[in-house]
Amino acid sequence: MQKLTEYRVLKSFSTRDGRLVYISAVARAKESPHLRDYLDSAIDEYARDLSYEEVMGDILRRKVLEFLRKKGIIVENLKIAVSYRCPVCGASIELSPETVIYVCPYCGWAGDISGKSRRVWVWPSVDYEHALSSLRRIVRRRFRVNEAILKYIPLWLVDVDAYVYYEGYYKVKRRDRYVTRYGRGEFREKLLYPVIARLNAEMFADEELKEDAVRNWNRLPPLDLDVELGKKIAKQILAPEIEEKEALRIARDEVESLYIEKALDALGGKGAVDKKLTEFKADIKTRNPRLVLAPLWLITYSWRGSIYTAAVSGIDGKALRAELPLTLGKRLFYITAAYLTAIFSGGLLELIYRFGDHDDTGKLLLLIAAGGIIGTLFFLRSAFKEYELWRG
């Protein structure tokens, strides 16, 4: 049996969608004087025409195998690995297929996957002791920390100029009946809007962190990320997966949705019901996206055998969200509240049933019964839940 020989090729190039990658191909086959040249030519021929996702998949491998078969070479085994290398220091970097911007953990360089340097802002984080003291003020009991992780969350902070005009109808109560009214209004505002630069990102305290970043943009301005700090925090950074253009689109869509809700709230005021917009015009301009890294401390702690999660902003050390233990006293309070709600609603139902002679007595009974049931179930559910969710 002829001994198999291993042939290796390492190539660097940009994919069809502009990502700088390094391809390492290892083929095991019977000795052939031309196999290495054929392997090199096959990667050159096919890799540049593929997108990054296709290169990362099995498409390139299948195309290379087919190319070699046409040359009359049967390969026993072919492995193709794709990686990035930092264009500054040449270090190999592991990135997910979704990553669009990264910070090199070896030299601190910040740039995109096509090798272009990018400007990134960052808030240096408060230290662990500061974050822990903020959490202790919220929990207010002795607990044991299980784990404390510092992550830098990428945000696009976008300037928004918004002009909104709306018209609509609503109902207000006048004596014993509801009447329909017409209303209109407008908003003209400038705001700073945050977009998390991650795909399908849902993380603990993400909304609170966005609000904290906007609040501190001018109060505690972030710094330009330099190479020294970049090397220090690179492994704690969640790599951005959304580019500027996409961030601008997301910001526009989300701001428009916010103004629809705002217009409905404003239409007729708080006492109005059955609100409906008949016209909504929004001129929303988004511009000047800045990529900023916002530090977030995620802390898990235990108290009396149960484990809870909390988040503290590394920007200013403010506690953002926490799962708080539910004490025995609070559970008893909720159980008592459920009992009193059931008694009160039951008594009220009986009084109205006996002495009510109004045409709307039936509707009133149904409303009271529904309110009593909902209130009782709410307090009972609160009494037996695992924790209370606190938001800063």
Image (cartoon, rainbow, N blue to C red):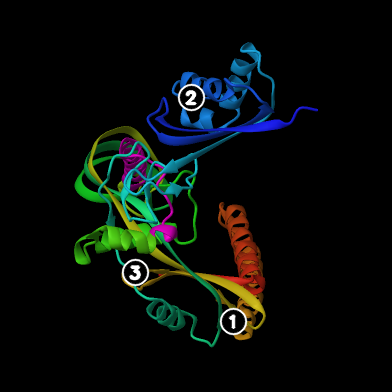
Task: Provide residue 119's location: percent of width, then percent of height.
Answer: 25, 48
Task: Count neighbours of disc 1 (C-alpha within 10 A) and say few if under 14, some if 14 to 19, many if 20 or more.
Answer: few
Q: Secondary structure at mark 3?
A: loop
- The verdict on residue 323 being magenta is no
Look at the image and give the residue range highlighted in magenta: 234-263
In contact (CB < 8 Å): disc 2 and disc 3 = no
Q: Is residue 390 at all visible to an observer of this figure? A: no
In space, the residues marked 3 and 1 are separated at their CA atoms by 35 Å
Q: Is residue 292 left or right of residue 105?
A: left
Task: Count neighbours of disc 2 (C-alpha within 10 A) and say few if under 14, some if 14 to 19, many if 20 or more.
Answer: many
Q: Which residue is mark 1?
A: 330
Which is nearer the N-term, disc 1 or disc 2? 2
Q: Secondary structure at mark 1?
A: helix
Q: Is residue 291 left or right of residue 42?
A: left
Q: Which residue is mark 3?
A: 125
Q: In front of the other: label 3 or label 1?
A: 3
Residue beneath the point at 28% across and 58% down: 227
Q: Is residue 315 at all visible to an observer of this figure? A: yes
What is the residue that sits farthest to the bottom in this orientation?
A: 142
Residue beneath the point at 49% across and 56% down: 203
User: Between 26 and 131, which is closer to the camera in this rendering?
Assistant: 26
Residue type (three-letter) at the residue carrying disc 2:
Ala
Q: Is residue 164 left or right of residue 296?
A: left
Mark linked to residue 47: 2
Q: Secondary structure at mark 2?
A: helix
- Magenta span: predominant SS is helix
What is the residue that sits farthest to the right in this orientation?
A: 1
User: Between 145 and 340, which is closer to the camera in this rendering?
Assistant: 145
